[in-house]
Image: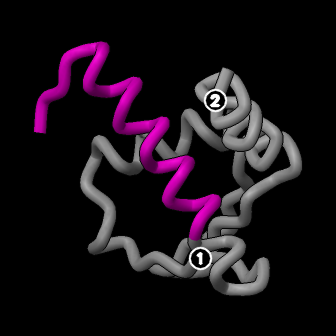
């Protein structure tokens, strides 16, 4: 999947919102993903979100565990606050 810059930014934003939603729906438990669930675009998006400090990733074999950080929570909630103004 090849995305434009605008599409890629939207993809990462939506991915962070999805992680936020799942984080609270699952009582803060890490999200478990298997290597075969991640195409290159998604891997790069997760890497970007981790390097920005929005998520933490821990690899264990073919499984990756993703946890939302405080910075990630503040970013999502801040974006919602800005949108409601």
Q: Residue at x 82, y 53 (%)?
A: 69
- Return the x and y of residue 49 as percentages of the image width and height: 61, 39
Residue ID for mark 1: 31
Query: Residue 2: within the magenta?
Result: yes
- Which quarter of the rendering shows the C terminus? top right
**76 with respect to 6 (left or right):** right
Q: Is residue 21 above or below residue 85?
A: below
- Return the x and y of residue 42 as percentages of the image width and height: 35, 49
Q: Residue at x 59, y 26 (%)?
A: 83
**73 with respect to 6 (left or right):** right
Decide: marks 2, 1 in contact (CB < 8 A)? no
Q: Which mark is residue 60?
A: none
**52 with respect to 18 (left or right):** right
Separation of residues labelled 2 and 1 (CA atoms): 28 Å
Q: Is residue 50 above or below residue 58?
A: above
Residue count near mark 2 (Cα–Cα under 10 Å), binned few <14, some 14–19, many ≥20: few
Q: Main secondary structure of the magenta part?
A: helix
SS at mark 2? loop
- Which quarter of the rendering shows the N terminus? top left
Residue ID for mark 2: 84
Q: Residue at x 40, y 24 (%)?
A: 9
Closer to the chain start, of discs 2 and 1, is: 1
Q: Residue at x 26, y 25 (%)?
A: 7
Q: Which residues are magenta?
A: 1-21
């Amino acid at each position: 999947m090849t995305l434009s810059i605008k599409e890629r930014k939207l993809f990462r934003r939506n991915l962070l919102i999805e992680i936020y939603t799942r984080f609270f729906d699952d009582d803060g438990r890490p999200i478990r993903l298997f290597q075969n669930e991640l195409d290159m675009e998604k891997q790069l998006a997760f890497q970007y979100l981790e390097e920005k400090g929005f998520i933490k990733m821990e690899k264990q074999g073919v499984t990756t565990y993703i946890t939302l950080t405080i910075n990630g929570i503040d970013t999502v909630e801040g974006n919602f606050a800005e949108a409601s103004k």
